[in-house]
Image (cartoon, rainbow, N blue to C red):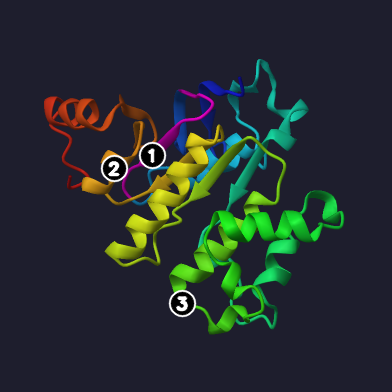
Amino acid sequence: MSSLIAENVTYSYSSNIKPALSKVSLKLEQGTLTALVGPNGAGKSTLLSLLQGSSKPDQGEITVDGKPLINNRSQVALMPQRGKLNWNFPITVEGLVSLGRVNHSKSTCCELEAALQRVGISHLAKRRLDALSGGQQQRALLAKTLMNPAKIFLLDEPCSAFDPPAKEDFLLIIRQLADSGLTVFVSSHDWGTSLNAYDKVVVLDKIILASGNPEEVQEKLSSINYLRWKI
């Protein structure tokens, strides 16, 4: 079973400032859908970068299937925030998705079509990115990420461009990905009934404040009177 484990991970952007993350430990198990929630500045994107291997922790260890992450990075794929891409670039949906192939190896038509079908945008394959809605762009970005032969997918605030109905549809897509055996870890600053769609919720504010199913997490936050973030 593919699992990702972080143990006592601490990370600072500079040696003379407080850590962005302190002694963070978590486990992502195969076939699960987990939400990472917390206020702005909590360290969510920083944690995803560490789990993907783009950054290295100052302390602690991250492993995939019991091996150091550095030796198993191909098993982890990161979908960045929508705002980090230039959506006016003159490229079609299928052009963007094909770029997701690891090491830029040529993707087959079957692989491309499968990725588009998994996110429900096969009919948009020939359309330019700048002609899509925000939600459609997010689906295209997810399809690009799914071109990776990874088993663990980290999604950085993928629902930020969605209205409530579109968010519900997207949650159904990533639920299906988890049910197919993939491990999906989704960051968000949104707390609401949509979290009930997840198997597990991790609350981060530089440290892990709570972890468990949605009901357990809400009870935990109430018990510690956590006020920084309105829940």
Write the residue at 54% across / 84% down.
131
Which image quarter: residue 14? top right
Labelled pair 2, 1 in contact (Cβ < 8 Å): yes
* SS at circle 1: strand
* Residue 70 drawn at (x, y percent): 74, 29
Q: On screen, 33 above or below 167?
A: above
Q: On screen, 156 above or below 124?
A: above
> First in sequence: mark 3 or mark 1?
1
Q: On screen, 230 above or below 220?
A: below
Q: Which residues are magenta?
A: 26-39
* Residue 148 drawn at (x, y percent): 71, 47
Labelled pair 3, 2 in contact (Cβ < 8 Å): no
Residue type (three-letter) at the residue carrying disc 1: Ala
Q: Residues within 10 Å of mark 1 (few under 14, many from 20)?
A: many
* SS at circle 3: loop
Residue with the mark numbered 1: 35
On screen, residue 188 versus residue 61, left or right, reads left
Residue occupying the far right of the picture: 105
Is residue 38 covered in magenta?
Answer: yes
- Inter-mark Cα distance, 3 to 2: 24 Å
* Residue 178 drawn at (x, y percent): 49, 37
Residue occupying the far top of the picture: 66
Is residue 219 covered in magenta?
Answer: no
Write the residue at 51% across / 59% down.
81
Residue with the mark numbered 2: 195
Write the residue at 18% across / 35% down.
226
Write the residue at 44% across / 54% down.
157
**The C terminus - image quarter:** top left
Residue type (three-letter) at the residue carrying disc 2: Leu
> First in sequence: mark 3 or mark 2?
3
